[in-house]
Amino acid sequence: MYPVVFQPVVKERIWGGHQLKTMFGVETDRPIGEYWTLADHPAGSSTVRNGRLLGRTLTEIVQDHPEDYLGRTRAKHFPLMVKFLEAESNLSVQVHPGDDYASMHGGDNGKTEAWYVLRALPGAKVNVGHRFANPDVFRQAIREGRLEDGLEFLNIHSGDVIYVPSGTLHALLEGTQVIEVQQSSDVTYRVYDWNRVDEHGNSRDLHVDDALAVLRFPENDGNDVNSDHAAAWQRDGARVIYSGPGVVHERKVDGEHFCLDTLSLREAGWKRLREGGTSPEILILAEGACRLTANSLDAEDFSAEERVLDLVPGDTVLVPATMSSYHLQTPSHAQFVLATYPTTQHG
């Protein structure tokens, strides 16, 4: 198998915008909030746009080639999802459940996520966490219209990475574009929607009871993910994996469900050596231009578009688990987000 790049699933959202449409070749007057550039979910599955698997969905190639596109995992479906999000206005204040609650209340996965900030207007913020002591105080603030007073806000800038574990209250706010890496899930519990109504005058449903069942509070959370300081640590904490001429590879998130790295190339080439057979690798080009060459493919057996990919911003590539190396080359600069997930020794 070979590295595949995907055509996204496009999702209209009330809070969406129009700037990312050019990146993904979307023509519509409706506000687009989400581009699912890698997804294997009943709500949407992205399709391959290169090589012999052209037109096949991620769901299909995972089923047909699990050794290559799943690797060593007990998962039956691809466990991660990648989205590009554009927030022209605020998203709802929301929380996602963990695996156990999501499975019991809807049959989906839980949702832990991380954001790589593509663009942010000057002074842009996100909500990560809250200051309410317990569920009773939280519910009273909702009844009295005071929820905003207890939210934690974090200033953001392009290039920041913010980790949002399940159970964390959060909201992307207006003027932000992010790449989101998350568990493959479509479960969201909204608690506040800024008193917004749609074009027909209808407000969106809230899910306060479910939210309170999974929301973390200081009194029962020793890790205190609800503070601005914890969010800032997640944003700024990084471990350098490799640094060389024109190349910086950093680990930003080392979590239970996925690892998220950033890879910066400046007029450089880089050979990526991997332990084949474990996890496939997700490469997301955030900015710049880059050529990916699959080193291990026999030229006689593979087409040019399977061996070589000329990548532009927005492209999301799935490198097979069985591929031991590939080469990246940029004429000027390239900024990648790179994601993998934990594997087992016996799939």
Image (cartoon, rainbow, N blue to C red):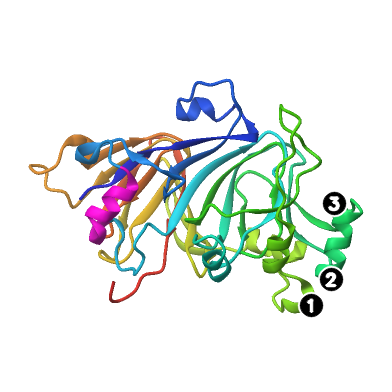
Label at residue 133: 2
Q: CA distance from mark 1 to mark 2?
A: 6 Å
Q: Which corner quadrant of the image does residue 333 belong to?
A: top left
Label at residue 269: none
Label at residue 148: 3
Stretch of the chain drawn in magenta:
57-68
- In terms of sequence position, does the residue under pointer 3 or pointer 1 come before the other? 3
Work out whether residue 91 or residue 203 is closer to the camera in this orientation and state it: 203
The structure residue drawn at horizontal position 36% and vertical position 70%, both measured from the top left corner, is 343
Q: CA distance from mark 3 to mark 1?
A: 20 Å
Circle 2 crowding by C-alpha within 10 Å: few under 14, some 14–19, many from 20: some
User: Residue most toward the right?
Assistant: 144
**Residue 142 relative to residue 18: left or right:** right
Q: What residue sits right under mark 1 in the picture?
A: 219
Query: Looking at the rendering, in which quadrant would you find the C terminus?
Result: bottom left
Give the percent coordinates (x, y) of residue 210. Answer: 68, 62
User: What residue type is disc 2 on?
Assistant: Ala
Q: CA distance from mark 2 to mark 3?
A: 15 Å
State the predominant SS element of the stretch in magenta.
helix
- In terms of sequence position, does the residue under pointer 1 or pointer 2 come before the other? 2
The structure residue drawn at horizontal position 73% and vertical position 72%, both measured from the top left corner, is 224
The structure residue drawn at horizontal position 30% and vertical position 67%, both measured from the top left corner, is 278
Give the percent coordinates (x, y) of residue 309. Answer: 29, 38
Secondary structure, mark 3, is helix
Q: Are marks 1 and 2 in contact (CB under 8 Å)?
A: yes
User: What residue type is disc 3 on?
Assistant: Glu
Secondary structure, mark 1, is helix
- In terms of sequence position, does the residue under pointer 2 or pointer 3 come before the other? 2
- Is 203 magenta? The answer is no
